[in-house]
Image (spheres, grey):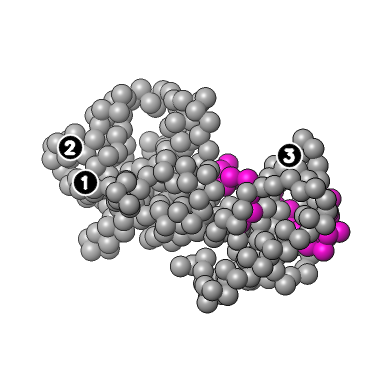
Amino acid sequence: MDVLRDPAPSSDLPRGGVVTIGNFDGVHAGHRMLLAGAVARARELGVPAVALTFEPHPEKVLRPDSGLKLVNTRAQKAQLLERLGVGTLVEIGFDRRFAAISAQDFAREFLFRRLAPAEVRLGTNFRFGSGRLGDVNFLSTLGHEMGFAVVGVEPLKEGGEVVSSTRVRREIARGHVDEAWRLLARPFYVDGRVYRGKRFGRQLGFPTINVNVENELLPAHGVYVTAIHIPSYSRVFPSVTNIGVRPTVYENSQVTVECHVLNFTGDVYQEPVRLSFLRRVRDEKVFGSSMELVAQIRRDVQAAELYFAQAGLPADELVRR
């Protein structure tokens, strides 16, 4: 997939394709439905499948104090879009100047003149342009004038509620990673690099991998059943992960992500890893002694072992489901 970041007006953009527009944070099940239709239509017409998105996320520019934490990193989003069949990702630089562009000027400049699409597909709840005045009906009228078709796609609903990036973020932040899995149609994961910690887990008999996470959003503090992909081993391993401040061991500690990999003794210091969250086990707790902590960790490991045994699938297949 080609990634074109804030291309100049003179750039050689893919013209005549099927274009989807959105922020695509999380690339959740609703996004997947929209993108699947666009990719299928592009293949039917024999034209490029193009996703048009905005960087940074508009809310970070228009509401900088909102505290928005995104589901994906920029690289993760591109990777997910590529897997779904998108041929070109066009990232438009978003700032307050861009936010002031009217919906009509956006359609004329960025769609008609620069991309000349055969068809544009977007969610019926998507808004664009200054004051969020542009929608699928507005674009349909302009498309008729400019010579491209517009298809509005109704939002996907799950449990009577629209599947949205906001909903996914809420579930992850609450620690409801199994619900997030359902909404994303894949487990929520974070990428990061292993750093050397204080080796306290090793002293307790449960060595951990400390992960310096690249993602902005983490699940709520607690213990989770996870699967960790270690590229140098070309494998996904069952694991159990703690997110929190380790209150039994340290006071005023920073938030850490510590992963105990089941039946693993390798050294992966400074290596990249991907950590997928499958189920929440428990809240973070303060224990009265190291012995109590060890007993609880043992129960956490048993909970993870039971989860994978009952799943009846290797960790790598669970992550791919």
Q: Kindly identify the residue that appears in the image at 50 percent across and 50 percent down.
A: 176
- Front-lying residue, 166 or 270: 166
- Tag 1 residue: 152
Q: Kindly identify the residue that appears in the image at 54 percent across and 74 percent down.
A: 310
Q: Kindly identify the residue that appears in the image at 46 percent across and 25 percent down.
A: 63
Q: Which residues are magenta?
A: 198-224
Give the side of residue 212 with respect to residue 2, left or right: right
Q: Secondary structure at mark 2?
A: helix
273 lies above or below 255: below
**Going from the N terminus, do you reach mark 1 or mark 3 first?**
1
Mark 1 surroundings within 10 Å by alpha-carbon count, few (fewer than 14), some (14 through 19), many (20 or more): some
Instruction: Give the quarter of the image for residue 232.
Output: bottom right
Q: Amino acid at mark 2?
A: Asn
Q: Secondary structure at mark 3?
A: loop
| Quarter of the rendering occupied by the N terminus | bottom left
- Tag 2 residue: 137
**Going from the N terminus, do you reach mark 2 or mark 1 first?**
2
- Front-lying residue, 207 or 287: 287
- Would you say residue 200 sits in the magenta stretch? yes
Image marks 2 and 1: residues in contact by CB distance under 8 Å = yes
Q: Amino acid at mark 1?
A: Gly
Give the Cα separation between the discs numbered 2 and 1.
Answer: 8 Å
213 lies above or below 43: above
Mark 2 surroundings within 10 Å by alpha-carbon count, few (fewer than 14), some (14 through 19), many (20 or more): few
